[in-house]
Amino acid sequence: MKSDKGQQLVISGVGGQGVLFVTRLLAEAAIDKGLPVFTSETHGMAQRGGTVISHLKVGEFSSPMIRPGQADGLLVLHAENLALHGAYARSGAWAVVNQAGRLEALQDETRTLEIYCLDAAQLAETVNSPRSSNLVVLGRVLSLETGLFCNFGDIVKVLEKRLASDSKRCNQAVAALETGLKAGA
Amino acid sequence: MKNKIRLLLGNEAIARGLVEAGCAVATAYPGTPSSEILPAVAKFKAEEGMSGHVQWAVNEKVAFEIAYTASIAGLRSSVSMKQVGLNVASDPLMSAAYMGAKGGFLVISADDPGPHSSQTEQDSRLMAMMAKVPVLDPASARQAKQMVRIGFRMSEKFSIPVLLRPTTRVCHSRQDVVLEKPQLVELKADYQKDPFRWAATPKFRFKLHGELETKLAQIAAWEASGPIQLNQVSGGSRAVLASGVSAAHAAEIIKSLGLWDKLPLFQVLQPYPLHMDFVRSILDNYESICVLEETVGVIEMQLGAANRVKGKLSGYVPGVGELLPEKIEEILSDFAGVRSEAVTVGKAPGRRPTLCAGCPHRAAFFAIKKAAPRGIYPSDIGCYTLGLNLGAVDTVLCMGAAVSQAAGFHHAFKEQEKHPPIVATIGDSTFFHSGVAPLIDAVVQRVPFVLVILDNSTTAMTGNQPTAASGFGVNGEILGKVDLEGLVKGCGVGFCRQEDPYSIKDFTSLIKEALEFCKENGPAVVISRHPCLLDLRRKGGSWEYRQVKVTETCDGCGFCVSQFECPALVLDEDAEQVSLDQGLCSGCGVCVEVCPKKALEVVL
């Protein structure tokens, strides 16, 4: 990991999009690398299509939650959530947003945010995996040069472990991840 | 064996602690944020080849009484639930405190400050105070696991039930946790008859109460559960006391404010009873004390010294809502007299939750509104609470109250000229939990109302746990099952019929028929029977898929969106057209019957 300060990511979406799944993959990848990890997740009623947010902290932390203004990066699976959860980003943070077209870098008096957009739903369709926009977004994150604690290969390893009993699903998941990765090339 | 590190949810860490400590009997009723504990106990037991009894009970009171009795019989046992579940189990809790435990007995009550998925923000630590049992308040998944072990030791050493109170942020955070080898315990029940204790009459209860006070005084001096100072600071006139996840937030924030070697931070592991030596030393050594805890000032009220303690009671710390880290940053900056850089996230509403596409409850609610358009609709706790969005849910009080509130509305209106029709809704699991007793009462009182039991064959909201009618247990093992119709009829209900709400016309007629029946004969029950699609999908099941298309007849009136609110139906107001999100559509085809313009068609 580039910085000893640890890394803090926010994963934001709506119930049913696989926010928890992406969080889990990243957290497992951290453990495989011997890094301490914390996540904080939304369960229960909000999972029925409501706004869902997870926090992921890798490194020496004691609290499972990210304070607003501290996140190094945002994975935004539902574009409207950028307005809701953008305040978690620190100045200079990045955000990968599931949205067709472009968004200008978000800026206010104190912070700038590098925004990368992609139409993850459409890209997921191209690999016949319409429910995998979460993995497409994650793939795009892995293509950024942000010094993230894990890379494409690390996530593939976690997917192979988690989906060991279902090789078809695993291949689809890797394909979705790769599509996101290539979208950044 | 080398110890393994695994990513565990707080609830799984608690479960792991239970299994490692040789907990022989574990029971629960599901409720967010506690639901994942019991399945994880079953999973870890299976992985370790350990025996014992693990079960979902019909409600928290029953779950408590089963686990407590295993403790009386000498085994380590636990019961887990959400905080409002402890209200249901409070009756046995109060008495169990007097009688005490034999095998270690842990009551796990998960609180939900926020609240994120609960009716109240109540603090189970206050319930512990009321019952006079000790309570442990973990800051993280790892610490929750350690506290299970401490809790069992305490329970056995002092012969007392011990409460473990995790909050949502502990239950639903994941952390790398070391798996240790489970303790090998011989599972041998050994019940010693002692009627003066286990069946104590008031005279002996008085004696037991005296013994309980002695135990509490000893526990307030027991080192293993005593407070810990998290940083090495000497001198200064200010100190911070924190418990639960607030302590974890506070540690990180004090570091980032550069106060780690200046501002002493103490974590209270056992908020009740507070260790008396600690109270004395804190009050002797510091002039000003800030207390961070959720959700009520439990530690603060035991400290006394109101003029020197800043917390919930003094108004220094907000008394409502979750104590978020950004709030703690503001509070601690002020307390230490440094500049706060805390940023807050605006309170934008976000997207509200809604019933899933294809949810059978949606069809049932639509039919209810059609059959009794000017009705009163008492409802209950579960996914179907979201019938609120459809205007088909008027009241939600607590588990089982739909039935008694239907009766309450009838009695309130009975002397008025106009009697609104009353159609109550309750889920299958909630009916088994607390709906039976009020239904018996309504039969006796001949209350004219229709009770729609929304039977989707599962406890959906909390993650699809089995119900009393499922016939299988936490690990899928085959169990007995209760016949819902038989139960309803056994309560004395004279009208009990079932229908699939997807057949929306027949279902609406059936409700109308039930409304007619109840006028003269007392309660009528309609069982709305269709499985939860999430549950079916999870179990690899399939269903008939009826592809629907929007025809040119659609004029974008929006009726289906506002009155049916299926997430797969999207209104484009500019185009005056509704479109169908095929990715979300489950193919239930119910919307075809809903559209007043007949603009939705099943593709043949």
Image: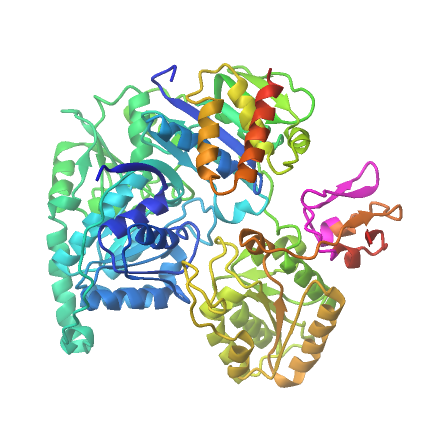
Residue B563 magenta-drawn?
A: yes
Residue drawn 62% across the image and 30% down it = A79
Q: Is residue B550 above or below residue A60?
A: below
Instruction: Where is residue B77? Give x, y as percent.
Output: 25, 60
The one of B355 and B584 positioned closer to us in this rendering: B584
Q: Residue furthest right?
A: B553
- Residue B264 sits in which quadrant? top left
The one of B56 and B340 positioned closer to us in this rendering: B56
What colour-coding does the image apply? rainbow
Q: Which residues are magenta?
A: B561-590
Instruction: Where is residue B46? Give x, y as percent.
Output: 33, 54
Instruction: Where is residue B562? Give x, y as percent.
Output: 72, 50
The reply to whether residue A69 is in sight is no
The one of A165 and A109 positioned closer to us in this rendering: A165
- Residue B378 sits in which quadrant? bottom right
Residue B472 magenta-drawn?
A: no
Instruction: Where is residue B230? Give x, y as percent.
Output: 21, 31
Residue drawn 59% across the image and 56% down it = B541
Residue drawn 54% across the image and 45% down it = A47
The reply to whether residue B593 is in sight is yes
Relative to B216, B95 lies left or right: right
Relative to B114, B246 lies left or right: left
Q: Is residue A68 above or below residue B52?
A: above
The one of A89 and B312 positioned closer to us in this rendering: A89
Q: Quadrant of the N terminus of chain A?
A: top left
Q: Quadrant of the C terminus of chain A?
A: top right
